[in-house]
Amino acid sequence: MKRLTRVGRSLLRNLIQAVPTMFVIVTLGFFVLQLAPGDAADYMAAESGAATQETVADIRRAFGLDLPLLDQLANYYTSLAHFSLGISPRYGVPVADLIMERLPGTLTLMVLAIVIALLVGIAAGTIMALNATRAADRILSVASLLFYSVPTFWIGLIFIIVFSVKLGWLPAGGMKTIGASSGGFGWLIDRVSYALLPATSLALYYMAIYARLTRSSILEVIGQDHVRTAKAKGLAPRQVVLRHVLRNALIPITTVAGIHVAGILGGAIVIETVFSWPGMGRLAFDAVMAREYTLLLGIMLVSSVLVICVNAIVDIIQAALDPRIEVR
């Protein structure tokens, strides 16, 4: 009961600390975006090809783009106080609706990428550690170094050429087959087939990191006193690894995985563009091209909240893995 109370206090503390963090992110993001040339009105005028100066001025006036910067920022904070992320000038709909429409796609891609990276990375790192200096260790070390060095978008392009164009095993882009029935096992297979290439492309970089980190953590833990005691008691090697070695080795991995959530969000922008995946990263890319600053601020805010929530969950997971760690 006391432990649950500490967890509740930790979550409340993280929530309170998130408020000034959100304030700094929104403020800095607003002024940084203003450094880019043009705005949504200029883009909409160029897109139409026939807009007059009066039309551009009307668009700016309608969405408050003609106001001084501090007034625009104050209006945005007023919208946030009313639980609104504003209206998109280009799409003419609430920013929250646009983000909520794309957020499930990005979360699906992120979760799959994290699961692939953790499962394969931890398994590979364990094999490397248990076979240190042997052939398996050397081969997997070279592979992890290769995946760590190659840019994510380049891996995605290679996957498209090999598995889509040459072999025809998996689709090259999109999220689902047009006209495919919703629900059932066939629907699940269709979604997985579309998500496998982008999720794997996004995961390989982090998989290499987790493999190397798992290897070093296991080699460090395996020489500690409690592991030697477990071996002396006659426990099977598998039990020693799973119960005493791997559990303690996972603590630094959970920390790094929480930090990497922000990087995975950033990588999703590139991967979703390469694979035409309809997610929040692709929406952010389109917003940059269209100078949709209100939409970009909303995406930054939602992304920051997501990262903060994941870091809070990581703290709880670490405390569950090692009771000696206090949830702060």
Image (cartoon, rainbow, N blue to C red):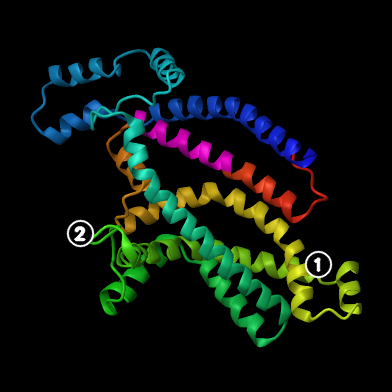
* Residue drawn where x is 19% and y is 31% of the image: 44
Q: Is residue 193 above or below residue 179?
A: below
Q: Which mark is residue 169?
A: none
On screen, residue 173 versus residue 139, left or right, reads: left
Which quarter of the rendered picture does the C terminus lie within?
top right
Q: Nearer the viewer, residue 198 or 314?
A: 314
Query: Can you give x and y, in whole percent of width and height, for residue 121 in the image?
Result: 59, 68
Residue span colored magenta? 293-309
Query: Can you give x and y, in whole percent of width and height, for residue 184 in the image?
Result: 32, 63
**Which residue is tagged 1?**
221
Q: Check disc 1: other Cα within 10 Å, few if <14, some if 14-19, many if 20+.
A: some
Q: Secondary structure at mark 2?
A: loop
Q: Is residue 87 above or below residue 260?
A: above
Q: Nearer the viewer, residue 289 or 255?
A: 255
Q: Main secondary structure of the magenta part?
A: helix
Query: Can you give x and y, in whole percent of width and height, for residue 98 in the image?
Result: 32, 37
Q: Is residue 263 above or below residue 60?
A: below
Q: Secondary structure at mark 1?
A: helix
Query: Can you give x and y, in whole percent of width and height, for residue 227 in the image?
Result: 85, 71
**Which residue is tagged 2?**
178
Which is nearer the N-term, disc 1 or disc 2?
2
